[in-house]
Image (spheres, rainbow, N blue to C red):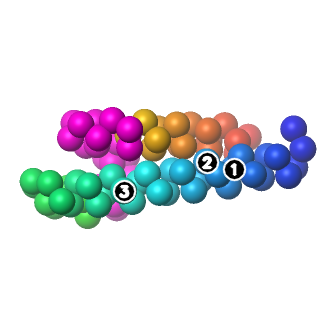
C-alpha cells in the first residue's frame, strides 16, 4: 500500500471514530441519565458500551469499525 493510501485510510478512520464518539456523547447527554454523555466523552471506552445499551447500534458500530480500522492502519 502506498504512503498516500495509508495516510488516507488513517485519516478517514480517525475522522469516523471522532465523529461517532462525539455523536454518541451527544446522544447520551440527551437521554436519562444525562451525565453519561460528558463521562463518555472523557472515558473513551464507555462510549460504545453505553451506546449499545441505549440502542444506538449504528453509532456504536461506526465507533467500533473506525477504531479497528484506525488501529490496523497505524501498523
Question: Judging from the image, what secondary structure is the residue with disc 1 in?
Answer: helix
Work out how far the residue at label 2 is from the one at label 3, CA to CA, in angstroms: 15 Å
- CB under 8 Å between callouts 2 and 1? yes
On the image, numbered disc 3 is attached to which residue? Answer: 23
Q: Is residue 66 left or right of residue 50?
A: right
On the image, numbered disc 2 is attached to which residue? Answer: 13
Mark 1 or mark 3, which is nearer to you?
3
Instruction: Check residue 25 in the rendering and tell me which mark sits there, or answer none.
Output: none
Of pointers 1 and 3, the one earlier in the residue sequence: 1
Q: Which residues are magenta?
A: 39-59
- The residue carrying pointer 2 sits among few (fewer than 14), some (14 to 19) or many (20 or more) residues within 10 Å by Cα, namely many
The vertical placement of 6 against 40, above or below, is above
Q: Residue at x 82, y 46 (%)?
A: 5
Residue 9: % across, % down: 71, 46
Residue 61: % across, % down: 43, 36
Instruction: Check residue 10 in the rendering and tell me which mark sits there, or answer none.
Output: 1
Residue 35: % across, % down: 16, 61
Q: Is residue 39 visible?
A: no
Work out how far the residue at label 2 is from the one at label 1, CA to CA, in angstroms: 5 Å
Quadrant holding the C terminus: top right
Q: Residue at x 21, y 41 (%)?
A: 54
- CB under 8 Å between callouts 2 and 3? no
Can you tell which quarter of the image residue 2 is in?
Answer: top right
Residue lying farthest to the left in this orientation: 32
Question: Judging from the image, what secondary structure is the residue with disc 3 in?
Answer: helix
Is 6 magenta? The answer is: no
Is 51 magenta? The answer is: yes
Amino acid at each position: 500500500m502506498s504512503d498516500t493510501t495509508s495516510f488516507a485510510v488513517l485519516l478517514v478512520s480517525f475522522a469516523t471514530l471522532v465523529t461517532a464518539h462525539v455523536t454518541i456523547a451527544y446522544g447520551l447527554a440527551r437521554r436519562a441519565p444525562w451525565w453519561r454523555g460528558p463521562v463518555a466523552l472523557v472515558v473513551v471506552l464507555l462510549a460504545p458500551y453505553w451506546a449499545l445499551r441505549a440502542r444506538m447500534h449504528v453509532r456504536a458500530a461506526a465507533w467500533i469499525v473506525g477504531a479497528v480500522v484506525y488501529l490496523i492502519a497505524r501498523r
